[in-house]
């Protein structure tokens, strides 16, 4: 028997169907609400609104669960690689050895970008943020590779997606090198995805980069943890822009712009900026913790708590382990990292933070890991974007093939002036 919800308006009862997801989530289907009642729903931030049905990622904020295509993120972080996880998200299943090898070969074969793109990179001001550059260059890919949207490979691996995954990594490293006036380092065919990126980012004619397997592991885990996260702001942006049937590159460019914000992907960069402020004020995090607990103060501790997770962020547990491993190996002397550890200790013991579930989240630890690895601060959000790319691609792919998909067009509740009539300029007071 189908379940329904009853809505009573002006004494009249309307029945709306209930949808039940595969994990027991329930939603009221309001597709016919306006047609039936003349009403719309009001939900700022869409925190209570489901915009689609999806088979990609399941998350439960109350229980601290995150799964990609049914696989717990903990298992993928421990056993998988970012390339394998990307294949899983885009194609729906883990690859066979043959499929994974073919995917890896394609990533290598398509890792170069058109040489003319360097002129575009070099035209940006040297102080331009890499996220702005990346967004523009991803959009430009359509003009440099007009054949990409039409090509598709066999065995569920789409050439367009593979090329985009590979080229975005190369473009991100190029933007960093060019912004600093350094020689561009090209991809190497003997290196896998994460190791190749680190080499492109850090190799230099005067100081060859030595591949550290522990840092490669750290980067793989970082990217896996950020590969998808259900209908977050940037993913919603990709789906919304894609709903107009614009090309994939424009939709991904929109996602990059959404991710840039400090309330989203820019949070890991904001963590380091906050730690810098604490250092400049004397290095004692206590006053900052006190401010965060003061309801009259708008100050927030960046990297603590999460809008969806009401318990501990499951990704934070994983990245904390990586963080501890990286810091122990590198034995860095960095006052910001020392402050971060003090702040973590305070927050994990403070009853206010515990009662309000303000635990260190993935952004807190990932910011520390990226800094320890030597990633420049302005590249933090770019690192996030590379990791999120498989999720964006899979969400775009799912949305354009959805038989129920429509052009996204939210409603509003108008609160402005009533009808007014034009007054000639000379009569206005």
Image (cartoon, helix red, strand yellow):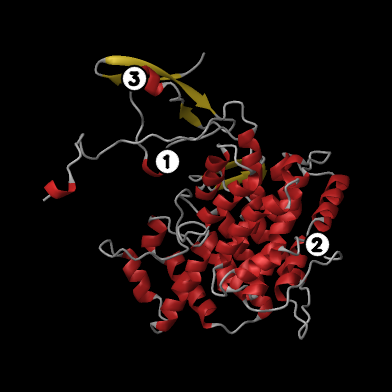
Residue at mark 1: 46
Q: Which mark is residue 162?
A: none
Label 2: element kind: loop
Q: Position of residue 280 (x, y in %)?
A: 42, 83
Q: Which mark is residue 37?
A: 3
At horizontal 53% and vertical 55% (from top left) the residue drawn is 257
Residue at mark 2: 192
- Mark before the other along the chain sequence, 3 or 1: 3
Q: Nearer the viewer, mark 3 or mark 2?
A: 3
Q: Position of residue 22 (x, y in %)?
A: 59, 30
Q: Is residue 231 visible?
A: no
Q: CA distance from mark 3 to mark 2?
A: 57 Å
> Is 330 placed left or right of 231 in the picture?
right
Q: Residues within 10 Å of mark 3 (few under 14, many from 20)?
A: few
- Mark before the other along the chain sequence, 2 or 1: 1
> Is 263 placed left or right of 145 in the picture?
left
Query: Between 93 and 32, which is closer to the camera in this rendering?
Result: 32
Q: Position of residue 215 (x, y in %)?
A: 71, 70
Q: Is residue 264 visible?
A: yes
Quadrant assignment, res 320 = bottom right
Label 3: element kind: helix
Q: Position of residue 56 (x, y in %)?
A: 63, 39
Q: CA distance from mark 2 to mark 1?
A: 39 Å
At horizontal 57% and vertical 33% (from top left) the residue drawn is 23
Q: Do residues under tags 3 and 2 come within 8 Å of each other at their CB atoms?
A: no
Query: Where 64 falls versus 52 (above or below)?
Result: below
């Amino acid at each position: 028997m189908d379940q329904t919800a009853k809505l009573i308006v002006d004494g009249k009862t309307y029945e709306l169907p209930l949808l039940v997801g595969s994990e027991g989530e329930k939603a009221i289907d309001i597709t016919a609400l306006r047609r039936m009642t003349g009403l719309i729903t009001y939900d700022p931030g869409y925190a209570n609104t489901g915009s689609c049905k999806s088979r990609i990622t399941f998350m439960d904020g109350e229980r601290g669960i995150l799964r990609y295509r049914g696989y717990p993120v903990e298992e993928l972080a421990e056993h998988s690689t970012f390339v394998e996880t990307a294949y899983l998200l885009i194609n729906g299943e883990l690859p066979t050895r043959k499929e994974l090898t073919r995917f890896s070969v394609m990533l290598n074969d398509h890792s170069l970008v058109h040489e003319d793109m360097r002129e575009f990179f070099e035209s940006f001001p040297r102080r331009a943020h890499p996220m702005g550059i990346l967004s523009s260059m991803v959009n430009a890919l359509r003009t440099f590779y007009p054949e990409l949207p039409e090509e598709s490979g066999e065995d569920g691996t789409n050439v367009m997606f593979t090329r985009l995954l590979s080229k975005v990594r190369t473009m991100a490293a190029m933007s960093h090198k060019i912004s600093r006036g350094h020689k561009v380092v090209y991809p190497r065919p003997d290196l896998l995805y994460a190791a190749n990126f680190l080499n492109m980012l850090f190799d230099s004619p005067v100081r060859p980069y030595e591949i550290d397997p522990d840092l490669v592991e750290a980067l793989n885990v970082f990217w896996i943890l950020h590969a998808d996260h259900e209908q977050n702001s940037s993913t919603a942006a990709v789906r919304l822009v894609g709903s107009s049937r614009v090309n994939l590159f424009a939709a991904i460019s929109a996602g990059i712009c959404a991710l840039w914000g400090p309330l989203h992907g820019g949070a890991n960069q904001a963590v380091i900026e906050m730690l810098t402020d604490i250092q400049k004020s004397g290095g004692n995090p206590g006053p900052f913790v006190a401010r965060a607990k003061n309801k009259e103060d708008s100050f927030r501790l960046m990297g603590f708590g999460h809008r969806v997770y009401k318990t501990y962020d499951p990704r934070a547990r994983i990245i904390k382990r990586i963080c501890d491993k990286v810091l122990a190996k590198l034995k860095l002397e960095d006052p910001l990292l020392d402050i971060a550890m003090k702040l973590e200790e305070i927050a994990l013991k403070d009853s206010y933070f515990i009662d309000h579930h303000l635990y260190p989240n993935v952004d807190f630890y990932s910011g520390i890991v990226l800094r320890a690895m030597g990633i420049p601060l302005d590249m933090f959000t770019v690192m996030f974007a590379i990791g999120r790319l498989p999720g964006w691609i899979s969400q775009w792919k799912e949305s354009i093939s959805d038989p129920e998909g429509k052009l996204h067009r939210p409603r509003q509740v108008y609160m402005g002036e009533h009808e007014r009539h034009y007054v000639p300029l000379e009569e206005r007071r």
